Image (spheres, rainbow, N blue to C red):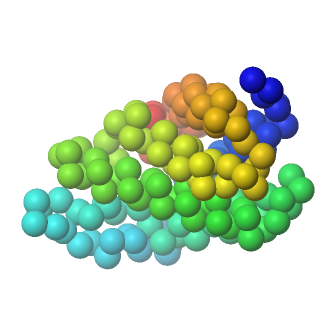
Amino acid sequence: MNVELKDILTALVLISTANSAPVIARKLLGVRFARPVDGGLQLKDQQPLFGASKTWRGLVAAVICTAGIAPLMGLSALLGAGFGIVSIGSDLLASFTKRRFGYAPSSRARILDVFPEALLPMLAFQSALSLDKWEILITALIFFVLEASVSPLLYRWHIRNRPY
């Protein structure tokens, strides 16, 4: 097992950027541009496809910010944008799954809220980021711990709407 700290840090920065950009965009822009990705569509189960908190503003913020941070780490902006798309796509998939299991929008389901948006983009860009399976696992676990630790602070600082 040859774990590279640089590769783990790079992946953590990309994941953190993709996941924090929508929260920061919401804080900066308020309700402006907060159009739900699902357009308010409800499925036969009477649950939204994703939920109102999954907005085009957040999606665009994640892609642009991740594309912007990638070159600072020696990666292409295109790779960063792709990473952001896969991360947010994974977040949408998690929201879709939570709705099907009966979780209310913005409700807490720690495993579904953290692991897909961390694991799927790392798996998709494993080669480009020079990540091996252990680095992916370690990075996902670190992200899980950071998310659980930092989220309550962001709530106290009025950056997040919920403490998780």
Residue 30 shows in this picture:
no
Closest to the observer, 113 or 149: 113
Dividing the image into 4 quarters, which one contains the N terminus?
top right
Q: Position of residue 110 (x, y in %)?
A: 40, 33
Q: Position of residue 105 (x, y in %)?
A: 29, 51
Closest to the observer, 151 or 144: 144
Residue at 31 percent across and 42 percent down: it is 107
Dividing the image into 4 quarters, which one contains the C terminus?
top left
Q: Is residue 119 left or right of residue 67?
A: left
Q: Position of residue 20 (x, y in %)?
A: 61, 50
Closest to the observer, 132 or 142: 132
Residue at 67 percent across and 55 percent down: it is 125
Count of marks overlaid on the render? 0
Residue at 73 percent across and 42 percent down: it is 131
Residue 110 shows in this picture:
yes
Which of the 4 image quadrants contains residue 140? top right
Residue at 18 percent across and 46 percent down: it is 102
Q: Position of residue 138 (x, y in %)?
A: 65, 28
Residue 14 sits above or below residue 2 on the image: below
Residue 89 sits above or below residue 103 on the image: below
